[in-house]
C-alpha cells in the first residue's frame, strides 16, 4: 500500500478496524422461488412552466359574414416594424417558440429600450382581429382601443385586439389593421 501512487495517512489518523467476531453468512437460493424484480417505467413528464391557455370568459364571438376567415392582419410599429399575421407568431427580442406553442414562428423585435422580453407574446390571427397572449413577460401586454386607456391582460390569457386598435409589448406599441387577400 506504500506504492508511490498512494497517499499514506499519518499513523493514528485511521483507527484500527474492530475484529469481526460474527460467522460468515451465506445466501441460500431456494429453487422455484423467483426474486422480486423491478420494472423501470418511463420518466414522468415535467410540468409546463406556463399555465395552459384557457378560453376567454364570456360568450364566444360570432364571426360576421365579411370577416369569417381569420386574417390576414398587419401589425405595424415604431422604426418601420411591420409583420403580416396569418397564423401563430411569437414576438420578442429573441423569441423562442417553446411548447405548447412550438408550431409558432418566432419574430424578433428590435427594442433598444429593452422593455420587450426575449419571448414576450403569442399572436394569432382570428376572424375578429389578432389574439394576443402574454407569455409571462416582464413588462406585460396592454391593449389600447379607441379613446380608452390601455388595460393589461393577464399572463397566459388570450385577448382579441380588434382592427384599428393596438397593443403594447412593454413600451412598444403595435397597431392592428386588416389586409385584403390581394395585398398579401
Image (cartoon, grey):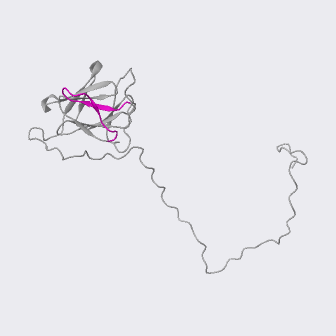
The image position of residue 138, as x and y in percent, is 40, 32
Which residue is rendered at x = 25% and y = 38% of the image? 159
The image position of residue 160, as x and y in percent, is 23, 37
Which residue is rendered at x = 42% and y = 44% of the image? 49
Q: How many marks?
A: 0
Residue 29 found in image quarter: bottom right
User: Is 127 left, or right, of 39 in this rendering?
Assistant: left
Q: Residue furthest top?
A: 79
Q: Which residues are magenta?
A: 139-156
Identify the image quadrant of the C terminus.
top left
Which residue is rendered at x = 88% and y = 56% of the image? 16
Q: Is residue 59 above or below residue 129?
A: below
Q: For residue 130: magenta? A: no
Q: For residue 140: magenta? A: yes
Residue 89 found in image quarter: top left
Residue 7 found in image quarter: top right
Q: Main secondary structure of the magenta part?
A: loop
Q: Residue furthest left?
A: 65
User: Is 166 left, or right, of 96 in this rendering?
Assistant: left
Q: Is residue 149 above or below residue 160?
A: above
Which residue is rendered at x = 28% and y = 20% of the image? 78
Q: Is residue 140 above or below residue 65?
A: above
- Which residue is more in the foreground, 139 or 29? 139
The image position of residue 2, as x and y in percent, is 88, 47
Amino acid at each position: 500500500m506504500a506504492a508511490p501512487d498512494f497517499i499514506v495517512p499519518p499513523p493514528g489518523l485511521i483507527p484500527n478496524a474492530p475484529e469481526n467476531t460474527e460467522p460468515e453468512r451465506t445466501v441460500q437460493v431456494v429453487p422455484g422461488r423467483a426474486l422480486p424484480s423491478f420494472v423501470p417505467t418511463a420518466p414522468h413528464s415535467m410540468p409546463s412552466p406556463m399555465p395552459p391557455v384557457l378560453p376567454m370568459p364570456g360568450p364566444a364571438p360570432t364571426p360576421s359574414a365579411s370577416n369569417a376567415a381569420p386574417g390576414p392582419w398587419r401589425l405595424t410599429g415604431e422604426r418601420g416594424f411591420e409583420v403580416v399575421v396569418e397564423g401563430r407568431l411569437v414576438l420578442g427580442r429573441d423569441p423562442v417558440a417553446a411548447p405548447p406553442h412550438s408550431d409558432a414562428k418566432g419574430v424578433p423585435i428590435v427594442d433598444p429600450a429593452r422593455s420587450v422580453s426575449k419571448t414576450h407574446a403569442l399572436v394569432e390571427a382570428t376572424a375578429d382581429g389578432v389574439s394576443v397572449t402574454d407569455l409571462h413577460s416582464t413588462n406585460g401586454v396592454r391593449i389600447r382601443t379607441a379613446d380608452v386607456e390601455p388595460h393589461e391582460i393577464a399572463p397566459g390569457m388570450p385577448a382579441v385586439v380588434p382592427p384599428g386598435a393596438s397593443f403594447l409589448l412593454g413600451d412598444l406599441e403595435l397597431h392592428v389593421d386588416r389586409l385584403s387577400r390581394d395585398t398579401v
